Image: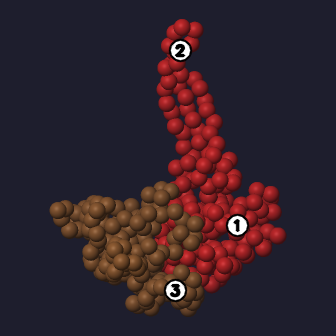
Amino acid sequence: MFEELRLLGPTESSIIVQTRKGSAIRNLIELEPGDQQRRRYRLLLNKFGRSWVERKPPTGTYNCAGHVWASRRTALLRPEDWRMILDEDGYRRLGDMERPVAGDLVLYVDNRNSEMLHVGRILRLRAGVADGSPPIPWVLSKWNSTSGEVMHRAPDVPFSAQGISHRIEFWTDRPNL
Amino acid sequence: MSAKVLEALTSEELALSVGFLSTSEALRRFLATTREVAAVRQAFEEGAIIEETVRRFVSDLLADFRRGERFPHEVALAALAVALQRRPTDFSEEFLRDLSQLKLAEMSTCIRVAHECRKRRVSLACAVSKDFNLPTSGESQLFHVKTFVSPLRDRHNDSANTTATCEVT
């Protein structure tokens, strides 16, 4: 059914990405978004991102995991590879009593199958709304391979509005105290 | 009706409903819950869609393919892959196999979703064997139970109530 496309030959390109232990990470350098993807991104930004602050307009090349672990050079598309990176690069999940700091990671995990939906990097902690309330982590996110980068509060993500039950996990490469 | 349910897969509403979901499994699961995919599944079951209609639909979509540009109908093809995931036909297998085996940056998302659908299709269509020692007439007797799990009989639920048949020897 897709014979003509198959005859075009592969158009994918990738680079070498490895974990600290040397395991290869599959990746894809994504194409730049076209007008359609840019328009849809703006619509979604209006819908979900009223409180977000845009850092960078829509761009291709990388996704959330490529932003966090591949320095914006390529997209890392497989959540199973993200788990491998956490493991082989020496990350640990923060305990309940530990606060994230700038540079730590925030993971959004689907409660139905424990698969990661998204990863972002903590930018800073801002004071909570009320006196004595815990500070709120702000995150730098690239939502997908054609979105822009935005800054947002850690809980302010679109998944719940889409009916997806998820949990937030904080991970760090800092040593356990 | 048949053309309409397929055309609904190209709607802006469906594309926007996907939001910022980006992993192939999250997309597959989400699309499986949409009314557009449900309508296509139902049309297949009722025989309102024939293979030729789908081939023509896909061919029309692919007319918009441009090398070096993102394919504008990725969500439609991904949704069609999800709709076909549980259909026990050679046509469904051909669609999922051919789409998932492409290596095109222009349509990386629907390729990954098709790959996920195919993986689920294969992983569900498995046979599980287990031996049981059960007492019969005062003696213990070995039963070999082979369970065939079919992904193709579960028409309405994406994750549960998968039908199984057992063969006891």
- Whether A53 is drawn above or below A62: the answer is below
Q: Are marks 3 and 2 in contact (CB under 8 Å)?
A: no
Residue B13, image x, y percentages = 66, 79
Q: Are marks 1 and 3 in contact (CB under 8 Å)?
A: no
Q: Residue at x 72, y 75 (%)?
A: B8
Give the distance between the C-alpha atoms of the residues marked 2 and 1, in whole angstroms.
49 Å
Q: Which chain is the one coloured brown?
A: A
In this structure image, what is the colour of chain B?
red
Chain letter of the residue carrying label 3: A
Point out the residue furthest to the front here.
A131
Identified by mark 3, the residue type is: Arg
* Chosen colour scheme: by chain
Can you see residue A10? no
Residue at numbered disc 2: B135
Circle 2 residues within 10 Å: few <14, some 14–19, many ≥20: few
Identified by mark 2, the residue type is: Pro
Residue A128, image x, y percentages = 37, 78
Q: Secondary structure at mark 2?
A: strand
Residue at numbered disc 1: B35
- Whether B62 is drawn above or below B35: the answer is below
Residue at numbered disc 3: A50
Chain letter of the residue carrying label 1: B
